Image (cartoon, rainbow, N blue to C red):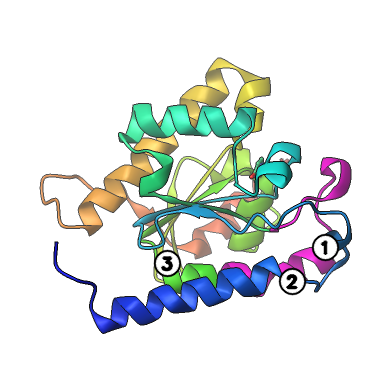
């Protein structure tokens, strides 16, 4: 294996600086009750990044994202549909500290944490982002349209593709249909990664423009 070039080395040290900054962050009230900051885990050079909502109890205890029941399901589906392990992708959350009693993160908490997520995206520079659930999908796509309407397509977003899908916790609650939807979305994401990394045999699924969201917004009940 050839040694990393100087550009890779400086990106790696920028990533470690970001981790250190996030791990000592006191920009919002969530720092008061956290056990650990859950910065993210996986390959910081990955082509694929998953973004969830925020750490739960197990994540707060271990300092790692998606290690509870939802995470075990995510690992399984990633393996079955994409042939990937969590070490070969990057997994992070919108907020890096656990909201008490697993409540939704508040707007001021999201705003305080957003620079960490944006810098993570900039440094990892994934080809495809999979948002897990209503919360991260609506936030990153800047829409009030709900995940059941958003999912099922890939969107052009910030120079990459964004594939919104259901949160694994919703699959645990929702059973077969929800599971089939997530499986299909993961296959879609992997096809886009394959294509963008040069596999010419891959038929890329359509990546639609975010402006098409306004069509979805016209659909009654779209915000679920
Ligand atoms: N749910 C999330 O959104 N993120 C985690 O890390 C765990 C559960």
The x, y position of residue 94, in whole percent, is: 66, 58
Q: Nearer the viewer, mark 3 or mark 1?
A: 1
Q: Earlier in the sequence, mark 3 or mark 1?
A: 1
The x, y position of residue 158, in whole percent, is: 46, 71
Magenta-drawn segment: 95-117
The x, y position of residue 218, in whole percent, is: 65, 51
Q: CA distance from mark 3 to mark 1?
A: 25 Å
Q: Main secondary structure of the magenta part?
A: helix
Q: Which residue is mark 1?
A: 31
Q: Nearer the viewer, residue 156 or 54?
A: 54
Q: Nearer the viewer, residue 12 or 180?
A: 12
Q: In this rendering, is residue 50 above or below 118? A: above
Q: Earlier in the sequence, mark 2 or mark 3?
A: 2
Q: Which residue is mark 3?
A: 124
Judged left or right of residue 104, residue 63 is: left
Look at 75% across and 64% down and name the residue there. Answer: 110
Label 2 neighbourhood size at 10 Å, few (<14), some (14-19), many (20+)? some
The x, y position of residue 123, in whole percent, is: 44, 73
The image's mark for residue 138 is none
């Amino acid at each position: 294996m050839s040694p990393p070039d100087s550009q890779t080395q400086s990106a790696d040290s920028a990533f470690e600086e970001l981790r250190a900054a996030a791990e000592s962050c006191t920009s919002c009230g969530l720092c008061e009750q956290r056990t650990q900051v859950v910065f993210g885990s996986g390959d910081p050079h990955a082509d694929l990044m998953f973004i969830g909502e925020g750490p739960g109890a197990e994540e707060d205890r271990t300092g790692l994202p998606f290690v509870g029941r939802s995470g075990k399901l995510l690992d399984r589906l990633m393996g079955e549909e994409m042939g990937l392990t969590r070490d070969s992708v990057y997994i992070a959350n919108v907020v890096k500290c656990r909201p008490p009693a697993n409540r939704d993160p508040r707007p001021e908490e999201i705003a305080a944490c957003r620079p960490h997520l944006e810098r993570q995206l900039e440094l990892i520079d994934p080809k495809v982002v999979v948002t897990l659930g209503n919360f991260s999908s609506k936030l990153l796509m800047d829409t009030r349209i709900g995940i059941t309407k958003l999912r099922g397509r890939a969107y052009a977003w910030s120079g990459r593709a964004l594939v919104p899908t259901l949160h694994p916790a919703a699959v645990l609650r929702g059973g077969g249909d929800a599971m089939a939807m997530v499986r299909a979305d993961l296959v879609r994401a992997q096809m886009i990664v394959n294509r963008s990394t040069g596999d010419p045999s891959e038929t890329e699924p359509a990546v639609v423009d975010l402006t098409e969201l306004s069509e979805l917004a016209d659909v009654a009940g779209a915000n679920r």
